[in-house]
Amino acid sequence: DQQVKQNSPSLSVQEGRISILNCDYTNSMFDYFLWYKKYPAEGPTFLISISSIKDKNEDGRFTVFLNKSAKHLSLHIVPSQPGDSAVYFCAASDDGGTSYGKLTFGQGTILTVHP
Amino acid sequence: DVKVTQSSRYLVKRTGEKVFLECVQDMDHENMFWYRQDPGLGLRLIYFSYDVKMKEKGDIPEGYSVSREKKERFSLILESASTNQTSMYLCASSLLGAGQGFYGYTFGSGTRLTVV
């Protein structure tokens, strides 16, 4: 049962344009969401996060939006750069003080930014 | 710079072998995790540990065991390697659980294991 889903395996955008990566979840107990970026032959690195009490969080070119009623979050990258080309994973946690920060990940979306 | 170090980048093992994957972190983190990454399936949790000698099963623990004798070291053991365990294995650590000052995971670079 895939509780976190990234339905687009890949996304291709032109440099300078906006990249929008989407993520859906089914577990209403999730209360913290994160995005990770992964280059080949490297481990994932933390990009940006959002708590369920917020609907938006911004960090430079990266913005994450959360729609709790739709159980949907998205990552916007503006403007996109060729160095952003990587696999992006959405992750969620349902920690209530007992799950030790266990994260459930989506399948990942391969982003390619063309010069 | 904080680090999670996985002992091997690439491993090739034979079916039936006992395989040890080692992970060491230098951040004094309480929590450590083992995931495997497969195309189309994302990252799936195998086991995690929230303290020395403590362990919990993740979503796909079958065929694996773990050991955490020291806070900084978390080992994944494939008791009898099979071809369906060919995968990228990722170790991660975190300071606290979400809601307690959670800052996400720090991942190692991964071990690409091939079982032939």
Image (cartoon, coloured by chain):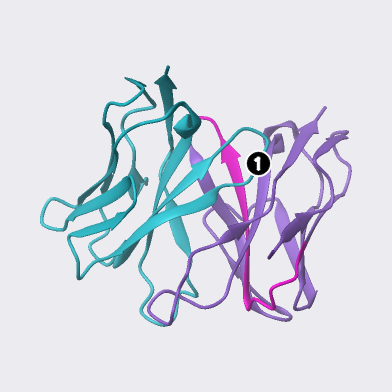
Chain colours: A cyan, B purple
**Location of residue A45 in the rendering, given as x and y in whole percent from the top left corner:** 54, 50
**Location of residue B45 in the rendering, given as x and y in whole percent from the top left corner:** 55, 55
A86 or B40, which lies in front? A86
Provide the chain ID for the residue under circle 1: A
The residue that appears at 15% across and 58% down in the rendered structure is A68
Say whether residue B40 is visible: no
Q: Which residue is mark 1?
A: A42
Q: Specify the quadrant of the image occupied by residue A108.
A: top left
Q: Is residue B33 above or below residue B114?
A: below
Residue sitting farthest toward the left: A69
Identify the amino acid type marked 1.
Answer: Glu
**Location of residue B5 in the rendering, given as x and y in whole percent from the top left corner:** 77, 57
The residue that appears at 42% across and 82% down in the rendered structure is B100
**Location of residue B38 in the rendering, given as x and y in whole percent from the top left corner:** 57, 35
In magenta segment, residue B31: yes
Say whether residue A60 is visible: yes
Left or right for A4, reference B11? left
The boundaries of the magenta stretch are: B24-39
